[in-house]
Amino acid sequence: MSYVSLEDAAIYFGVTARTLRNWGSAGRITLYRLPGGRTLRVRLDEIESALKVVPTVGNAS
């Protein structure tokens, strides 16, 4: 399990750090706060899971 900064994760996944913060607030991913209170980290595997495409059944009309 790899923990990275919001900025590094945002670059890796092509989103903004603000998007990751929003996902954390919405409960899509977990944000981990380091001692000192200001620095946040995320797990890359959680973001990968949040970004997985879920197949859906389309209208066959």
Image (cartoon, helix red, strand yellow):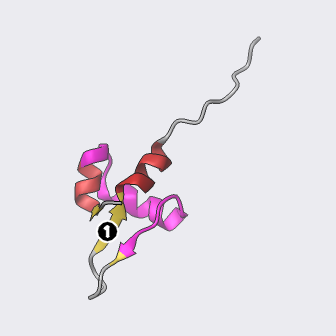
Q: Position of residue 32 (x, y in %)?
A: 38, 73
What is the secondary structure assignment of the residue under circle 1?
Answer: strand
Q: Residue furthest top?
A: 61
Tell me if 12 is positioned left or right of 45 in this view. Answer: left
The image shows a total of numbered marks equal to 1
Residue found at x 31% / y 72%: 40
48, 19: nearer the viewer = 48
Q: Is residue 33 above or below residue 57?
A: below
40, 21: nearer the viewer = 40
Residue found at x 52% / y 36%: 53
The C terminus, quarter of image: top right
Q: Residue furthest bottom?
A: 36
26, 40: nearer the viewer = 40
Tell me if 31 is positioned left or right of 14 in this view. Answer: right
Q: Is residue 30 above or below residue 55?
A: below
Q: Position of residue 9 (x, y in %)?
A: 28, 54
Residue found at x 24% / y 48%: 11
Residue 33 belongs to the span the image colors magenta:
no
Q: Residue furthest front?
A: 1
Q: Quadrant of residue 35?
A: bottom left
Neighbour tally class for label 1: few under 14, some 14-19, many 20 plus, Cα within 10 Å: some
Q: Residue furthest right?
A: 61
The N terminus, quarter of image: bottom left
Q: Is residue 33 above or below residue 12?
A: below
Q: Position of residue 17 (x, y in %)?
A: 30, 58
Residue 21 belongs to the span the image colors magenta:
yes
Q: Which residue is mark 1?
A: 41
Q: Which residues are magenta?
A: 12-32
Q: Is residue 34 above or below residue 59?
A: below
Q: Amino acid at mark 1?
A: Arg
